[in-house]
Image (spheres, rainbow, N blue to C red):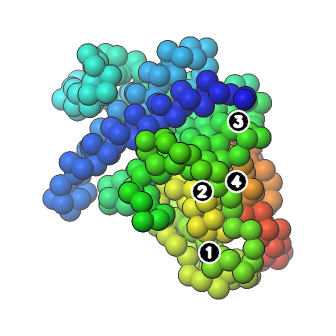
Amino acid sequence: MAYETEKQIAIKAALAAGQLCERVRHEISPEAIEKKDRSPVTIADFGSQALICRELATEFPNDPVVGEEDAAELKQPEMAERLSQVADYVGAIAPNTTPDQVVSWIDHGNGSVGPRYWTLDPIDGTKGFLRKDQYAVALALVEDGEVKVGVLVCPALQLSAAQPGLMFVAVRGEGTTMSGLDGQNPQTIKVVSSENDPNLRFVESVESGHGNQAQQAEIAKAAGITQDSLRMDSQAKYGAVASGEAALYLRLPSPKTPDYREKIWDHAAGTIVVEEAGGRVTDMHGKPLDFSQGAKLVDNQGVVVSNGLLHDKVIAALQQQTS
Ligand SMILES: Nc1ncnc2c1ncn2[C@@H]1O[C@H](COP(=O)(O)O)[C@@H](OP(=O)(O)O)[C@H]1O
Ligand SMILES: [Mg+2]
Ligand SMILES: [Mg+2]
Ligand SMILES: [Mg+2]
């Protein structure tokens, strides 16, 4: 099987990072939420990136890693205590970790997009993490602009009566699986395959500033969706489409930030998870997402993720609206 080592290492690293994030998250007090104290997400974000980059640097020393975070802030003298907190959390999983190692692992994620690279969002959905809602650890391998391997660890996601915590894994040409966070018994998943499916609904961001909820509702309606949207933080939305919990995910540019360009780490892992489950991912103009241009999807605007069946209808509705 292709990319077997990459897949196994990505799973191991993302699960360890998810474990660290959950430890931090369980310690967030209601007062911290009240005060909008961002320190828990800072610690978990840096710790997650450090753990994953440590694994990738060891196993694939020649592969650049394009991660969301860097250690510039954490290196400041006034951040020494925060850094030692991060080192303690990382050390619980990778014993004897020093603060210097943490900094250098995080900075390993400063790589550039090239013919082969990894992209990492150590915590996607930081706002969801702080609200104790959804978040994801997202890791993907990209070669020649095409995502080849994607892992999404969603520690708070629950799609059935089972324990919360789901992992989605996809390898190009080999399908997408879903499992619990023990990684045991991965099940192949498929998108919604009929227009009569009770899950013919759409997902969108909780954060109104990350999209255009009014336009998203109109487009979903034009595509024949009559149910209200399901709002969810992070790339867990891609997991919802891939597993057939929803048929569409719309992310149209917010009127407040019309020139915003999406980041590769917010979409790479999710894209392959949906495509390998039978779905489609493009921008709002129907163009494939181009992961070869740098950290931003400079040639794309908005994102449309569907079960495939609905895709052309959605793009046509968007074209009609703007013409
Ligand atoms: N104006 C904007 N439009 C679209 N996405 C935005 C945005 N500002 C920030 N984001 C991205 O939205 C991501 C969260 O997605 P969602 O809203 O689906 O949960 C953030 O990832 P992080 O939380 O990793 O920073 C951030 O990169
Ligand atoms: Mg993100
Ligand atoms: Mg993030
Ligand atoms: Mg961020």
Image coords of residue 268 (percent x, y): 63, 43
In the orientation shown, which residue stands out farthest toward the front? 185
Residue under label 4: 277
Q: CA distance from mark 3 to mark 1?
A: 28 Å
In primary-sequence order, the first of circles 4 and 1 is 1
- Asked whether residue 220 is in view, the answer is no
The kind of secondary structure element at disc 4 is: loop
Circle 2/circle 4 CB separation < 8 Å: no
In primary-sequence order, the first of circles 3 and 4 is 3
Nearer the observer, disc 2 or disc 4?
4
Using residue 52 as the reference point, say whether residue 119 is left or right of it. Answer: right
Image coords of residue 274 (percent x, y): 67, 53
Would you identify the image quadrant in which residue 251 lies? bottom right
| Mark 4 residue crowding within 10 angstroms, few (<14) / some (14–19) / many (20+) | many
Amino acid, disc 1: Asn
Circle 1/circle 2 CB separation < 8 Å: no
Amino acid, disc 4: Ala
* 304 or 73, nearer to the observer: 304
Would you identify the image quadrant in which residue 244 lies? bottom right
In primary-sequence order, the first of circles 3 and 2 is 3
Which circle marks residue 148 in the picture?
3
Amino acid, disc 3: Lys
Image coords of residue 124 (percent x, y): 47, 48
In primary-sequence order, the first of circles 1 and 2 is 1
Q: Is residue 142 above or below residue 189?
A: above
Amino acid, disc 2: Tyr
Q: CA distance from mark 3 to mark 4?
A: 14 Å
Residue under label 2: 238
Circle 4/circle 1 CB separation < 8 Å: no
The kind of secondary structure element at disc 2 is: helix
Q: CA distance from mark 4 to mark 1?
A: 16 Å
